[in-house]
Protein backbone atom coordinates (compact mmCIF):
# COMPACT_ATOMS: atom_id res chain seq x y z
CA UNK A 1 0.00 0.00 0.00
CA UNK A 2 1.48 3.28 -1.11
CA UNK A 3 1.17 6.49 0.93
CA UNK A 4 1.55 10.14 -0.17
CA UNK A 5 5.13 11.01 -0.98
CA UNK A 6 6.50 13.41 1.66
CA UNK A 7 9.74 13.90 -0.30
CA UNK A 8 8.15 15.64 -3.28
CA UNK A 9 8.08 19.28 -2.24
CA UNK A 10 8.16 22.69 -3.85
CA UNK A 11 11.59 23.33 -2.41
CA UNK A 12 14.36 24.89 -4.46
CA UNK A 13 16.88 22.84 -2.47
CA UNK A 14 18.70 19.85 -3.97
CA UNK A 15 17.79 17.42 -1.17
CA UNK A 16 15.08 16.82 1.40
CA UNK A 17 15.71 15.43 4.90
CA UNK A 18 12.81 14.44 7.14
CA UNK A 19 13.58 14.43 10.86
CA UNK A 20 12.43 11.43 12.83
CA UNK A 21 11.45 11.27 16.48
CA UNK A 22 14.80 9.70 17.50
CA UNK A 23 17.85 11.93 18.01
CA UNK A 24 19.76 12.06 14.72
CA UNK A 25 17.28 10.00 12.67
CA UNK A 26 16.85 11.36 9.15
CA UNK A 27 15.31 10.16 5.93
CA UNK A 28 17.20 11.66 2.98
CA UNK A 29 16.08 11.88 -0.65
CA UNK A 30 15.92 14.22 -3.61
CA UNK A 31 12.72 16.30 -4.01
CA UNK A 32 11.80 14.86 -7.41
CA UNK A 33 10.41 11.41 -8.16
CA UNK A 34 13.03 8.66 -8.00
CA UNK A 35 11.91 5.04 -8.09
CA UNK A 36 15.09 3.51 -9.53
CA UNK A 37 18.63 3.73 -8.18
CA UNK A 38 19.79 4.97 -11.58
CA UNK A 39 17.62 8.07 -11.00
CA UNK A 40 19.06 8.92 -7.58
CA UNK A 41 21.66 11.71 -7.69
CA UNK A 42 25.03 10.82 -6.14
CA UNK A 43 24.53 13.79 -3.82
CA UNK A 44 21.93 11.78 -1.84
CA UNK A 45 24.54 9.14 -0.98
CA UNK A 46 27.27 11.69 -0.27
CA UNK A 47 24.96 13.66 2.04
CA UNK A 48 23.96 10.45 3.83
CA UNK A 49 27.59 9.47 4.31
CA UNK A 50 28.40 12.89 5.74
CA UNK A 51 25.42 12.82 8.14
CA UNK A 52 26.36 9.30 9.30
CA UNK A 53 29.92 10.51 9.97
CA UNK A 54 28.61 13.48 11.97
CA UNK A 55 26.46 11.16 14.09
CA UNK A 56 29.47 8.90 14.76
CA UNK A 57 31.50 11.95 15.78
CA UNK A 58 28.65 12.87 18.17
CA UNK A 59 28.79 9.46 19.84
CA UNK A 60 26.54 7.14 17.82
CA UNK A 61 27.74 3.56 18.29
CA UNK A 62 26.36 2.60 14.87
CA UNK A 63 24.40 4.31 12.12
CA UNK A 64 22.13 2.00 10.17
CA UNK A 65 21.43 2.74 6.51
CA UNK A 66 18.03 1.38 5.52
CA UNK A 67 16.42 1.67 2.11
CA UNK A 68 13.10 -0.08 1.58
CA UNK A 69 10.99 2.37 -0.46
CA UNK A 70 7.87 0.20 -0.31
CA UNK A 71 5.28 2.34 1.49
CA UNK A 72 6.61 5.45 -0.22
CA UNK A 73 7.51 4.62 -3.83
CA UNK A 74 10.51 6.93 -3.75
CA UNK A 75 14.07 5.87 -3.08
CA UNK A 76 15.16 7.39 0.19
CA UNK A 77 17.69 6.47 2.87
CA UNK A 78 16.83 6.08 6.53
CA UNK A 79 19.85 6.98 8.66
CA UNK A 80 19.04 5.50 12.03
CA UNK A 81 21.58 5.90 14.86
CA UNK A 82 22.14 3.53 17.75
CA UNK A 83 23.31 5.36 20.89
CA UNK A 84 25.20 3.95 23.88
CA UNK A 85 22.02 3.78 26.01
CA UNK A 86 20.18 1.61 23.46
CA UNK A 87 19.68 -1.98 24.52
CA UNK A 88 18.26 -3.10 21.17
CA UNK A 89 20.31 -3.33 18.00
CA UNK A 90 19.77 -3.58 14.26
CA UNK A 91 16.37 -4.43 12.83
CA UNK A 92 14.70 -4.66 16.25
CA UNK A 93 15.82 -1.13 17.13
CA UNK A 94 14.57 0.23 13.80
CA UNK A 95 11.25 -1.60 14.03
CA UNK A 96 10.60 0.20 17.33
CA UNK A 97 11.24 3.65 15.80
CA UNK A 98 7.67 4.80 16.49
CA UNK A 99 7.82 4.01 20.22
CA UNK A 100 7.49 7.03 22.46
CA UNK A 101 10.66 6.29 24.43
CA UNK A 102 13.29 7.65 22.00
CA UNK A 103 16.38 9.75 22.68
CA UNK A 104 15.42 13.39 22.05
CA UNK A 105 17.17 15.64 19.59
CA UNK A 106 19.78 17.58 21.57
CA UNK A 107 20.87 21.15 20.90
CA UNK A 108 24.23 19.78 19.74
CA UNK A 109 22.67 17.42 17.17
CA UNK A 110 20.27 20.13 15.97
CA UNK A 111 23.21 22.50 15.47
CA UNK A 112 25.09 19.80 13.56
CA UNK A 113 22.00 19.24 11.41
CA UNK A 114 21.74 22.93 10.60
CA UNK A 115 25.44 23.12 9.70
CA UNK A 116 25.18 19.97 7.54
CA UNK A 117 22.02 21.13 5.75
CA UNK A 118 23.46 24.56 4.96
CA UNK A 119 27.03 23.58 4.16
CA UNK A 120 28.69 24.39 0.85
CA UNK A 121 28.55 20.70 -0.05
CA UNK A 122 24.82 20.17 0.36
CA UNK A 123 21.68 22.22 -0.06
CA UNK A 124 19.05 20.49 2.08
CA UNK A 125 15.47 21.31 3.07
CA UNK A 126 14.96 19.88 6.57
CA UNK A 127 11.38 18.94 7.43
CA UNK A 128 10.42 18.44 11.09
Image (spheres, rainbow, N blue to C red):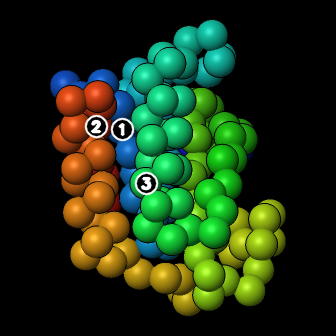
Give residue 31's quadrant in the image. Answer: top left
Dot 2 crowding, Cα within 10 Å, few <14, some 14–19, many 20+ = many
Residue drawn where x is 62% and y is 87% of the image:
85
Q: Earlier in the sequence, mark 2 or mark 1?
A: 1
Residue 5 picture location, percent across and down: 48, 38
Side of 19 where 62 appears, left or right: right
In three-dimensional space, the C-alpha distance between marks 1 and 3, rounded to whole angstroms, equals 17 Å
SS state under label 3: helix
Assess disc 3: are there few (<14), some (14-19) or many (≥20) residues with their C-alpha within 10 Å of its C-alpha: some
At label 1, counting other C-alpha atoms closer than 10 Å, the crowd grade (few under 14, some 14-19, many 20 or more) is many
Give the image quarter of residue 87: bottom right
Please determine whether, in this image, residue 63 is positioned above or below residue 88.
Answer: above
Residue 5 in view (yes/no): no
Q: Which residue is mark 1?
A: 16
Residue 87 is left or right of residue 127, and the answer is: right
- Name the secondary structure under disc 2: strand
Cβ atoms under marks 2 and 1 closer than 8 Å: yes
Q: Which image quarter is the C terminus in?
A: bottom left
Q: Which residue is mark 2?
A: 124
Q: Which mark is residue 47?
A: none
**What whole-number distance in Å separates the C-alpha atoms at marks 2 and 1?**
5 Å
SS assignment at label 1:
strand
- The answer to which of marks 1 and 3 sits earlier in the sequence is 1
State which mark lies toward you, 3 or 2: 3
Tag 3 residue: 54
Which residue is farthest front?
57
Query: Mark 2, mark 1: which one is toward the viewer?
Result: 2
* Above or below 20: residue 7: above
Q: Kindly tell me whether residue 26 is visible in this rendering.
A: yes
Amino acid sequence: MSIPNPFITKTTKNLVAIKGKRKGYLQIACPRSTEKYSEVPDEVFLAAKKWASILEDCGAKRVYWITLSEKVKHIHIHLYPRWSDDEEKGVQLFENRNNENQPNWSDEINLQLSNWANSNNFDVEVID
